[in-house]
C-alpha cells in the first residue's frame, strides 16, 4: 500500500525525485476538492450557457465551445484590435486590478483551502501572451503583426507583463503558494505557430519574466502548452520550469525525458486519435493506457494524463474516460 498522499507523491515528481507510484496530472489539484484562490478576474469561469456571450476584462467577447467540454473561446470573427499600432487606444488596464483587496481575499479564502490539494499561483491576467494576442486580433492579424510590427507587439506584451508581475508578486506575498503555473498555447499539431527566431525575440523574454517571481520564491513550476511544443522545451527548462503538460504524443516524449531528466512529463496521451474512433474497442483503449504507462513511467519523471473531450455529459466521452481512468488506477502502483 502507498504511504504518500497523492499530493505529496505529485510534489515529489515536481522536485525531480522518484515518486512512490505513477502520479496523475490531477493529483493534488484544486479540482480534487480545493477552493479557488485569488481574485476572479476573467468572469469566464463557472456555469454559463453555451448560447451565452461574455466579455473578459479587456472587452474580448467569448462564447462556449460545446464539443470542447463547453470551454470558453474568443468569439470567432469578432476581434477588438485590427491594427497593432492602435493597441494603446483599445487595450486598457482593467479597473478590476485596482480594486483587489488581497489581504481580505487571503483571510477569507485560505481557511477554506484543502491542505490535500496543491496551492498554486497563475502567471497571467488571462491566457498566455500568444493567446492574448490572437484573442485581441485573431490568428491571421496577430501573426501578421508579429512579422510587420514586432516592436508594437512587444510593447503590448510588456504592458500585459506588468500586470502579470503585479498579480504574481501579490499572490506570492499573500498566499505563499507551493507551485506556480505558466501557460501559452503557442503550437499546433505539427509545429509552433511561429519561428524559433520570432519566439526568442518576442515571446521568450515575457515568458521568462512571468515565471521568475515563482522561481525566485522557491515554488515548483509547471508550464502548459498543447501541440508540437518540442522545439521550445529547452527554453522552459532554462527558465526554471519543473514540469510540462499536457505533453502530447506528437512530441518525442521518450527523447525529451532522456534529454531533460529533471523535467516532469505530464500527460503522454493521444486524446484526438485512436481512442476517439467509434470502432476502437474498450480493450483496445485499455491496452493503449497500459502501452503509454509502459513507455513513459519507467524511471519516474512522468505523470499520466489522458482522456477525450466532448460535450458535457456526452455518454460516448464519459464512457471512454471511465475506461481510461479505471485502467490507469489498476496499473499506477505497478511501476515503482
Image: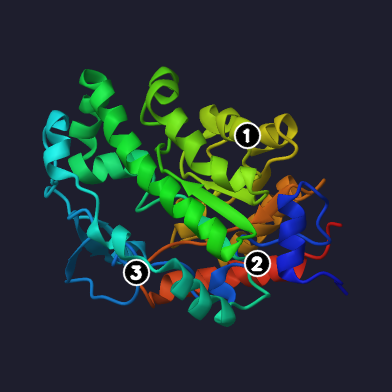
x, y percent for residue 290: 70, 57
Whether the residues at callouts 2 and 3 have beta carbons within 8 Å, the answer is no
Q: Quadrant of residue 113?
A: bottom right
Whether the residues at callouts 1 and 2 have beta carbons within 8 Å, the answer is no
In the displayed structure image, the side of residue 3 where residue 123 appears, left or right: left
Task: For marks 1 and 2, give the CA distance.
Answer: 22 Å
Helix, strand or loop status at disc 2: loop
Task: For marks 2 and 3, give the CA distance.
Answer: 21 Å
Residue 237 got which mark? 1
Residue annotated with mark 3 = 45
Quarter holding the N terminus is bottom right
Mark 2 packing: few (<14 Cα in 10 Å), some, or many (20+)? many
Q: Is residue 191 visible?
A: no
Residue closest to the eye, 82 or 20: 82
Q: Nearer the viewer, mark 2 or mark 3?
A: 3
Vertical comparison of 6 with 121: above or below: below
Residue annotated with mark 2 = 27
x, y percent for residue 205: 45, 29
Mark 1 packing: few (<14 Cα in 10 Å), some, or many (20+)? some
Going from N to C along the chain, the mark reached first, 1 or 2, is 2
In the displayed structure image, the side of residue 226 where residue 130 appears, left or right: left
Vertical comparison of 329 with 149: above or below: below
Residue closest to the eye, 225 or 318: 225
Q: Is residue 139 visible?
A: yes
Residue closest to the eye, 32 or 160: 160
Q: Nearer the viewer, mark 1 or mark 2?
A: 1
Quarter holding the C terminus is bottom right
Q: Quadrant of residue 331?
A: bottom right
Amino acid at each position: 500500500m502507498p504511504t504518500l498522499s497523492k499530493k505529496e507523491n505529485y510534489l515529489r515528481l515536481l522536485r525531480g525525485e522518484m515518486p512512490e507510484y505513477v502520479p496523475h496530472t490531477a493529483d493534488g489539484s484544486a479540482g480534487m476538492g480545493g477552493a479557488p484562490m485569488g481574485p476572479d478576474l476573467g468572469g469566464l469561469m463557472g456555469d454559463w450557457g453555451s448560447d451565452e456571450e461574455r466579455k473578459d476584462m479587456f472587452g474580448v467577447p467569448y462564447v462556449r465551445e460545446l464539443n470542447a467540454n463547453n470551454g470558453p473561446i474568443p468569439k470567432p470573427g469578432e476581434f477588438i484590435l485590427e491594427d497593432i499600432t492602435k493597441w494603446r487606444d483599445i487595450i486598457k488596464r482593467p479597473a478590476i486590478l485596482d480594486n483587489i483587496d488581497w489581504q481580505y481575499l487571503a483571510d477569507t479564502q485560505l481557511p477554506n483551502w484543502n491542505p490535500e490539494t496543491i496551492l498554486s499561483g497563475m502567471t497571467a491576467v488571462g491566457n498566455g501572451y500568444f493567446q492574448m494576442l490572437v484573442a485581441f486580433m485573431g490568428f491571421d492579424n496577430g501573426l501578421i503583426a508579429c512579422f510587420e510590427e514586432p516592436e508594437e507587439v512587444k510593447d503590448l506584451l510588456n504592458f500585459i507583463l506588468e500586470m502579470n508581475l503585479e498579480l504574481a508578486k501579490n499572490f506570492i506575498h499573500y498566499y505563499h503558494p507551493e507551485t506556480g503555473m505558466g501557460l501559452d498555447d503557442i503550437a499546433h499539431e505539427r509545429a509552433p505557430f511561429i519561428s524559433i527566431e520570432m519566439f526568442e525575440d518576442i515571446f521568450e523574454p515575457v515568458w521568462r519574466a512571468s515565471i521568475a517571481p515563482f522561481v525566485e520564491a522557491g515554488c515548483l513550476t509547471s508550464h502548459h502548452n498543447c501541440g508540437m511544443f518540442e522545439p521550445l522545451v529547452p527554453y522552459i527548462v532554462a527558465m526554471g520550469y519543473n514540469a510540462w503538460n499536457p505533453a502530447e504524443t506528437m512530441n518525442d516524449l521518450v527523447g525529451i525525458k532522456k534529454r531533460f531528466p529533471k523535467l516532469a512529463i505530464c500527460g503522454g496521451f493521444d486524446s484526438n486519435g485512436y481512442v476517439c474512433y467509434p470502432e476502437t474497442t474498450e480493450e483496445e483503449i485499455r491496452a493503449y493506457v497500459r502501452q503509454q504507462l509502459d513507455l513513459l513511467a519507467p524511471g519516474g519523471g512522468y505523470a499520466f494524463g489522458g482522456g477525450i473531450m466532448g460535450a458535457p455529459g456526452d455518454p460516448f466521452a464519459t464512457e471512454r474516460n471511465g475506461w481510461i481512468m479505471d485502467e490507469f488506477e489498476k496499473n499506477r502502483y505497478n511501476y515503482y
